[in-house]
Amino acid sequence: MKHLTDAEYKDLSRSEKIKYRLRRGLYHLKCFFDPSRVTDLEYLRMGKFKKIWYKIKRFFVSIPSKIGHFFVKVWNTIKKGVLAVKNEFVDIFTTFKEGSWQTKVSYFVMGFGNLARGQILRGVLFLLFELVFIGYMIIAGGHWLSKLTTLGTEAGQSNVYDPATDSYIAAPGDDSFKILLYGLLTVIFIIALIYTWRVNVKQNKILDKIVKSGKKIKSGKEDLHSLVDDQFHKTMLALPLTGIMVFTVIPIIFMILVAFTNYDALHDGYSNLFTWVGLDNFNELFSWSSGTGKLSAAFGEILSWTLMWAFFATFTNYFLGMFVAIMINKRGIKLKKMWRGILVLTIAIPQFVSLLYVSKMFADNGLINGFLLDMGWINDPIPFWTDPTYARITVILINIWIGIPYLMLIATGILMNIPQDLYESSRIDGASVWQQYTRITLPYMLFVTGPYLLTSFIGNINNFNVIYLLTGGGPTNPNLLTSGGSAGDTDLLVTWLFNMTTGAETNYKLAAVIGIMIFLVVAVISLVVYNLIPSTRNEEDFQ
Amino acid sequence: MKDTKKVKEKKVKKNRRHMSMKTKRRIGNTAIYVILAILIIIWLLPFVCILLESFRVDSPGQSGNVIPKVWGFDNYIRLFKESDFGRWYLNTFIIALCTAVLQTVIVLCMSYTLSRLRFKGRKLLMNVMLVLGMFPGFLTMIVLYKVLSGLNLTGAHALPGLILVYCASSGMGYYVSKGFFDTIPRSLDEAARVDGATRFQVFKKVIMPLAKPIIIYTVLSAFMAPWGDFIFARYISHGTSSGYNVAVGLWSWTTKTSIGTHYTMFCAGGVLVALPITLLFMFMQKYYVEGVTGGAVKG
């Protein structure tokens, strides 16, 4: 904030004066609410701990303004969106008003403009799309769409008396699952049509312009050629994006919709229809009253263990893996390749083999307990898998066993990239090994692997294999026995989700809700971390 | 006189310090060797145990003695004669082969486009992919299972279903490969474009020959993944033994009811699964290491 002298102030125009005073006022207001702010010079003079303390303080003080900024951003995005939609409509209208007759016809018969002007390929494609759409809507789409609001009204019955043949037959009824799926597909089809129609209008606008200026219109051959040249990305992305659309996007949207229905073992969709229930499932999950069998309590417990697990699993692996890499990398250690090779080799062995075997090793009658009992060091087997605390610790320990080779591999590559002269000069300056580690190695590692840490944290939140193959989620906790499938003390949200979708007590609605919750947790963590770690902001610091 | 004495003293001190540094380092190194040796033992022990167990012919007692009293190949023979293991193995092999080919094509298309072509909506596409990746992958299985079972691609016919599931969404795992393409200088493309090459020709004749390491990495990781996949395979095969892959099959032997009789067979199966993968891995370790470390740095 620049402070003007009186003379300068007098020179300002009226509106500038008001602006200046407003800004001054805001500045003072800021200082009033935020007394902790210091100038750069003062900051540089602070001691190390004071700096850290200051940063922490600043972080918390700045939270309200950050939230404010966020809302301003959201508001601006909404405004922009509304404006864009408005512009679209205006454009559609003006194109119609000013367009040629071919363009006007194209508003109803898609591709007509292209056909009339000799772009046969595009025209035929547009027209075909429209015809297919109309045909589909008449044959099936309308039917599914009309049932989408209720998800079916009549369940199928197995024994219905049929007077014509004098026998009992199965009467087919509605199938909620199919209605939801096909309804969703129909909605997506409609959106696709609207989009294509808009493209069609835009193309006609361009065609009008070309015709007016007397230039040549692109032929179908040129269109095809552009697919390997200017439009090559469309060719390349066609297959992958279709796969993602069909196998990821549509299922995810479907499952989000399921979260608002009562689809479970009791309402399977054909003999007992399911229907929309609004936010009931979320309410059930968040009704904060604890007690045995309460869903919200189970959810809280499992969520906290999931986060705890992800934290320990990520950071124990990270630091221990780095430690092993540093040990092997140390000058004077021989047979570096052999040490590394043996550890890396263990990566190659499929995880399920080692996990299942290790799980048996730690069982009550397993190898470890057998050995310890034989040696007479213990009198009773250690309850590795049957005691909640033991189970949790064992799972984390075994995860270290699984994870260290990976981290060692990654850390080795990065450690070798650290300029050796940094170490040389620090040694000459009399730095101890520990100082070298905390001042050179660790910052460098953290900087380079920041994004990796985030992805591995998230990977651990969803680490199905380790938990499921080791403990299967056990030991079962009576407090976590809910209607939504039973859960154990080492169950993560994902394994809980898995249990809900298999076995006798399928509870798809809850699985969908849990899935959304996992998404939210992951999204929030990623957002926060991405804003905190340096590697995403200034990429060239260490290059 | 005094001065020289001081100098001498200093020298001695220095010498002593030097000596102690040397011994210190030696002690440190020895400690590291000991730690490393212990680590290696811990890391290899379970695998050695599996190997030993797989040759055990006497009763499969789990506790105590690791070394079998009677050695033999009985478990391996039983594996193929008395169980579906051969079928599972073949299933997994077919899945892995198809996945390796299809997934490589898809991932390469995706990563090449996102890395080296500029088009409208590229950033948006990447952001959407990021958000989609935040949903637990398993969530989609509930719908996919129903749809696939409607198409009769589950249970005994799980193979095509599984291949579809593995490959269809594999475009979302483009990160490592994109990181590789990002490192190839853009001037190569531009030079070829100036010479009149189409974008397809640039892709085919300029970049692909340079992309050998990442192609090998992608093929390798795509081939190895189905051997260890449990969650999707179990869901799609849905309790039908002939549709299992090795992971689900061997897992089904470790349940409480069958662990007693199938324990040593499980170990033999584990060895047979781990063997080819390990050999392949050793063969292509260089590329794998490049891929993993590169991917980690790029995020």
Image: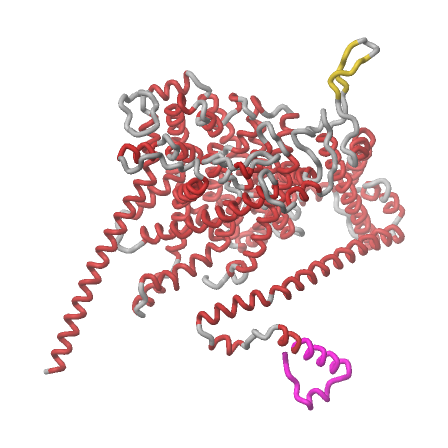
Q: Look at the image and say whether residue A3 sits in the magenta stretch.
A: yes
When the figure is inspected, residue A6 is found, relative to residue A498, above or below; the finding is below
Residue A209 horizontal/vertical position (percent): 81, 53
Q: Nearer the viewer, residue A130 or B1?
A: B1
Q: Nearer the viewer, residue B153 or A420?
A: B153
Residue range highlighted in magenta: A1-27
Residue B133 shows in the view: no
Number of marks: 0
A53 on left or right of A28:
left
Residue A369 horizontal/vertical position (percent): 34, 34
A382 on left or right of A516:
left
When the figure is inspected, residue A341 is found, relative to residue B193, above or below; the finding is above
Identity of the residue drawn at 76% across and 14% down: A169
Residue B248 horizontal/vertical position (percent): 49, 28
Task: Kindly give the residue lying farthest to the front in the view shown.
Answer: A291
Residue A77 horizontal/vertical position (percent): 72, 58
Task: Kindly give the residue lying farthest to the left in the view shown.
Answer: B1
Residue A6 shows in the view: yes
Q: Nearer the viewer, residue A390 or A180?
A: A390
Identity of the residue drawn at 38% across and 27% down: B267
Residue B8 location, quadrant: bottom left
Tell me the quarter of the image containing the N terminus of chain B: bottom left
A295 on left or right of B213:
right
Q: Nearer the viewer, residue A311 or B120?
A: A311
* Main SS class of the magenta portion in the image: helix
When the figure is inspected, residue A483 is found, relative to residue A447, above or below; the finding is above
Task: Kindly give the residue lying farthest to the bottom in the view shown.
Answer: A7
Identity of the residue drawn at 52% across and 59% down: A533
